[in-house]
Structures are given as C-alpha cells and as structure tokens.
Image: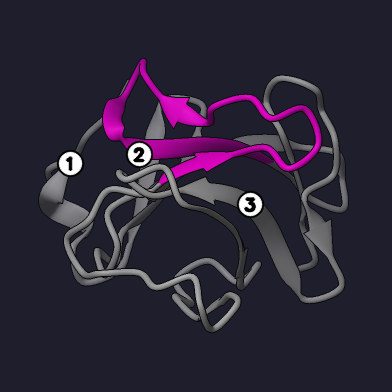
Amino acid sequence: MKNDYVCPFCRGHLKVKNSVIFSARKPGGERGLLLLSPEIGNYAVRKHRTFELNDGEKTDLYCPICHANLMAQNYNNNLARIISIDEYGEENVILISEIVGERCTYVIHGKKVEKYGDDATNYFGAGTEF
C-alpha cells in the first residue's frame, strides 16, 4: 500500500520518493532536515552527517513547507502528528516520537490505535481507544 503523507496544517505533501521529509530543531536550536522511511515501523533516518542526533534527546519536528510545529498536543508533547492518505483517499492520523532513538509509531483509525515499534507502549497502553 502506497500512502501519501501531508501536514495537518497546510496539507502540503511531505513524501518525496522514498522519504517523508521534516525540518527538525534540536534543544540547542540547531536545525536540519530529516528523511524518514514512509513504511510504518521502519525507523531508518537519513540526515546530513553534521546534524548529530543523540539518543534520548527531544528533537522538534516541523513541516518543511509551512514551518508549523507538528507537536501532537492533543495526544502527547513528545509525539509529532501528520496525516496519511491511502490510495482510496482514507485519512488517518500518524503519531511519531520526537525522542531520538525511541521507536514508536501510532496509526489512529477513528477511535482505534495501531501501535508499532519496540517502545510503542510508552504512550498508549493495550486497548487504547479515543
């Protein structure tokens, strides 16, 4: 299944070829671009070699188009929120951790939550619904 990913604010497309692109800012203010895999549960990250990421560090993610902060305030301040659109036009909320090295992704279908990654229980326990 090939999903598109869009910013929840400007609806700009974040996926280019095989990457979902984010602007990122580290706690000290240093900025860079992050290219993440569009495959849910694949935690590969590409970045410039000088933009160092340290495990456990919170790195704020922004839309590279409208520069909106993608923090998922309605869910948890350590998560970023984007929208996926499948080939049938169905939209789902995608939440990803902004903590470097934390492997957790959530796909919200209506009131149901699908959890992915070794750290998926960090924010939503078993049977979580909205």
Residue 68 visible (yes or no)? yes
In the picture, the quarter occupied by the C terminus is top left
Pointer 1: residues within 10 angstroms few (<14), some, or many (20+)? some
Between disc 2 and disc 1, whose residue precedes? 2
Closest to the camera, between mark 2 and mark 1, is 2
Percent of width and height locating residue 61: 50, 43
In the picture, the quarter occupied by the N terminus is bottom right
Q: Which mark is residue 123?
A: 1
Q: Which amino acid type is shown beneath numbered disc 1?
A: Tyr
Q: Is residue 76 magenta?
A: yes
Q: Which amino acid type is shown beneath numbered disc 3?
A: Phe
Question: Which residue in the protein does label 2 denote?
Answer: 79
The foreground one among 125 and 61 is 61
- Residue interval drawn in magenta: 60-83
Percent of width and height locating residue 48: 60, 77
Q: Is residue 82 above or below residue 38?
A: above
Q: Indicate the secondary structure of the residue bearing disc 3.
A: strand
Residue at 67%, 25% (x, y): give it. Answer: 8
Percent of width and height locating residue 5: 74, 48
Q: Disc 1 versus disc 3: distance between alpha carbons?
A: 22 Å
Q: On the picture, is 23 further left or further right than 19?
A: left
Contact between labelled residues 2 and 3, with CB atoms less than 8 Å apart: no
Pointer 3: residues within 10 angstroms few (<14), some, or many (20+)? many
